Image (cartoon, grey):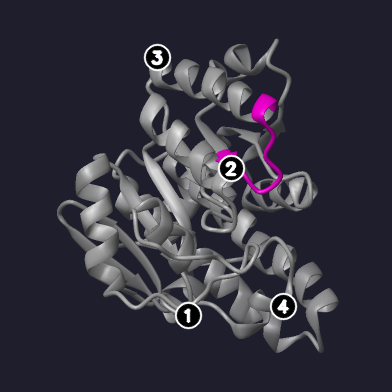
């Protein structure tokens, strides 16, 4: 996989990435997409979400700050995206924390077509049906083989499944990719998981092989994090540098740092 080739496609095509996302991290999700060279839009009103999806290249849903009304708007947007044939990415943020969050995650998965399901290990385990409890929106230990778990969910849902962690996993029915790029400082910044879903959305907007799109997106994101960490003394400086390093990623750097195993 050539992550730089897809990054260049995102920069060249500048796809619109429509979000119904987490209010805590909405600015960061918009900025990370803009730093890539794509075009973010954050439209939540049920009166316009279907129309907005029609001008987008991908739709990103994130249940981090969910309400019943927001999930209903997500269904409208996703149904419109399904009709257009653009990818829908669902970040099951906090699945496993409450029954309400679990129910709404499954409603979305059951009622509209979700192309990419993204979460940490415990979130993905919960929407797979395991009795796992998430610590708020942070991952908890999962006593299962994550690669098998991801591939089984991908096969059952006919989707691509992303599990973020020290090594990111991207699975579909054909196999699993492992992405080893990234840095521990990412866990000290609120919103890095939400931003990952946004970057995946931008890459999926230009690449129909969603496993490849997600793997390359996470590799570029992780490489930018590694570079940002080199010039940062803590979370605040790291976050600012992350946008700059993603914006400035070039071909020699990607060729040197990319770590995707198929």
Furthest toward the right, the residue is 236
Give me the residue at 48% from left, 80% from top.
Answer: 166
Q: Which mark is residue 140?
A: none
Q: Is residue 227 left or right of residue 205?
A: right
Instruction: Give above or below for 166 relative to 104.
Output: below
Spatial separation of the CA atoms under disc 4 and disc 1: 13 Å
Q: Which residue is mark 2?
A: 100
Q: Is residue 234 visible?
A: yes
Residue 84: x percent and y percent? 42, 16
Q: Quadrant of the C terminus?
A: bottom left
Residue 77: x percent and y percent? 55, 21
Q: Which mark is residue 188?
A: 4
The local secondary structure at tag 4 comes to: helix
Of marks 1 and 2, the one in the foreground: 2
Give me the residue at 55% from left, 38% from top.
Answer: 60
Q: Which mark is residue 83?
A: 3
Q: Which residue is mark 1?
A: 166
The local secondary structure at tag 3 comes to: helix
Q: Nearer the viewer, residue 89 or 211?
A: 89
Q: Earlier in the sequence, mark 1 or mark 2?
A: 2
Spatial separation of the CA atoms under disc 4 and disc 2: 27 Å
What segment is highlighted magenta in the picture? Answer: 61-69
Cβ atoms at labels 1 and 2 below 8 Å apart = no
Spatial separation of the CA atoms under disc 3 and disc 4: 39 Å
Spatial separation of the CA atoms under disc 1 and disc 2: 28 Å
Q: Quadrant of the N terminus?
A: bottom left
Instruction: Give above or below for 246 relative to 229.
Output: above
Q: Earlier in the sequence, mark 3 or mark 4?
A: 3
């Amino acid at each position: 996989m050539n992550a730089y080739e897809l990054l260049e496609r995102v920069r060249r095509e500048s796809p619109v990435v429509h979000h119904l996302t987490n209010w805590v991290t909405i600015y960061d999700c918009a900025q990370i997409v803009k730093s890539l060279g794509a075009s973010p839009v954050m439209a939540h009103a049920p009166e316009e979400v279907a129309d907005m999806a029609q001008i987008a290249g991908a739709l990103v849903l994130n249940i981090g700050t969910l309400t019943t009304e927001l999930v209903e708007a997500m269904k409208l947007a996703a149904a419109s995206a399904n009709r257009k044939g653009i990818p829908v990415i669902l970040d099951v943020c906090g699945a496993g924390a409450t029954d309400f969050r679990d129910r709404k995650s499954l409603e979305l998965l059951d009622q509209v077509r979700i192309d990419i399901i993204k979460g940490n290990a415990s979130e993905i385990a919960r929407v797979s049906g395991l009795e796992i409890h998430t610590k708020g929106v942070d991952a908890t230990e999962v006593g299962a083989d994550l690669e098998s778990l991801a591939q089984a969910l991908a096969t059952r849902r006919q989707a691509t499944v992303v599990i973020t962690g020290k090594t990111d996993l991207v699975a579909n029915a054909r196999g699993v990719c492992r992405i080893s790029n990234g840095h521990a400082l990412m866990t000290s910044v609120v919103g890095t998981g939400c931003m990952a879903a946004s970057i995946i959305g931008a890459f999926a907007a230009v690449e129909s092989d969603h496993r490849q799109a997600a793997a390359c997106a996470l590799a570029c994101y992780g490489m930018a994090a590694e570079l940002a960490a080199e010039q940062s003394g803590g979370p605040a400086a790291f976050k600012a540098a992350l946008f700059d390093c993603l914006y400035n990623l070039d071909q020699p750097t990607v060729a040197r740092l990319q770590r995707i195993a198929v």
